[in-house]
Image (cartoon, helix red, strand yellow):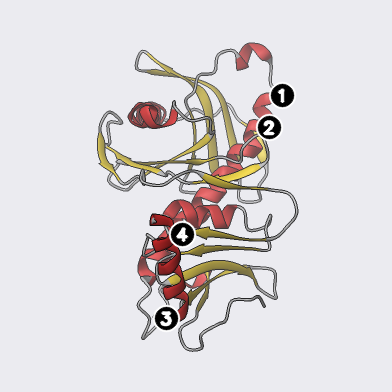
Amino acid sequence: MNKLKLIIGIILLFPLSSFGQKIKDLNFDIKDFQQKAKTAEWLYMYDIIAWWTTDSVILADSTEIARLGPEWFCFQSDDNNWHAIYGKYENDTFDLVFHYIVDTSFKVKRVDEKVDTSILNGYSRALQTANKHIKLHTDSINIKFNQYIRQNEDKTFDVWFFSAFQPNGWAVYGKEFILKIDKTGNKVLEDNSYYDTDFRGFEVNEPREIWINQTKFEKPTLGLVFFVWYYKKYFTYIKINNKDYITTVIKDSDGSYVWMHYEKDKKEKKKEKKKKKKKKK
């Protein structure tokens, strides 16, 4: 399949639909990865909904577009329909300009349906709080980010900021901003961001195999799992090289994508240690 040798007995292969699978004699943190893979799939769908509805917003009347602020978000209702909300939050009030619904058949339509003010104001405040929190880190770099938000069962919010597909055609990864905001949307409860890493990227042109070297991490970060899932169709293979394992996604015979993890052999680990020592010198 590729130059990397597969070590029999320690390969983990599972589709995203088979979470909860038990693998014996494997030190890889399966539970952690499964949770990240589920979240990455949800983020990917969120991104698609945003793209589809933004295309409609761009074609709307200019007087409506002029009313927009930086506050926009998507959420999924109990009927599994997606809602995309665009407007402006000011003086504790959200001015709803565009409301799109993407149903389970992926049909996009604009609706006049009202949205609970607690959703409009809560999501907007949480986004404003999160953006202020990371402003110091994002203002100094010329990289575009996408924002994602989801409300939890306890009414708190998870907010993520990951590097967007850049206008120059580059796929970028690096710092990941991951925050938990309280249910009022006003306070950061947790900051699970990855600040201690540089931004790197690949130009998206010819399909090819690419490697992401993150050997200082024992397991893939959420941002990298999302990166692989997002760009899986643009490259032949995207391989995350962590301390003891290599993670990638492959296309199955039925056209679906599955995750695969390889445990490195001792020789490979020794080579990486030597490279690190040379760099320090």
**Residue carrying label 4:** 38
**Residue carrying label 2:** 55
* Position in image of residue 175 (x %, y %): 43, 43
Hey, what amino acid is under mark 1? Leu
Disc 1 + disc 4, Cβ < 8 Å: no
- Separation (CA) of disc 3 from disc 1: 57 Å
| First along the sequence among labels 3 and 2 | 2
Q: Where is residue 278, by image quadrant? A: bottom left
Furthest-right residue in this view:
206
* Position in image of residue 135 (x %, y %): 38, 27
Residue at 69%, 54% in the rendered image: 234
Disc 3 + disc 4, Cβ < 8 Å: no
* Position in image of residue 252 (x %, y %): 66, 73
SS for dot 1: loop
Residues packed near mark 1 inside 10 Å, few (<14), some (14 to 19) or many (20 plus): few
Residues packed near mark 3 inside 10 Å, few (<14), some (14 to 19) or many (20 plus): few
Q: Is residue 277 visible?
A: yes
| First along the sequence among labels 3 and 4 | 4
Hey, what amino acid is under mark 2? Asp
Q: Nearer the viewer, residue 263 or 114?
A: 263
The answer to whether 9 appears left or right of 27 in the picture is right
* Position in image of residue 198 (x %, y %): 45, 44
**Residue carrying label 3:** 266
Furthest-front residue in this view:
281
Residue at 56%, 40% in the rendered image: 164
Q: Nearer the viewer, residue 38 or 269?
A: 269
| First along the sequence among labels 1 and 4 | 4
**Residue carrying label 1:** 59
Q: Where is residue 270, by image quadrant? A: bottom left
| First along the sequence among labels 2 and 4 | 4
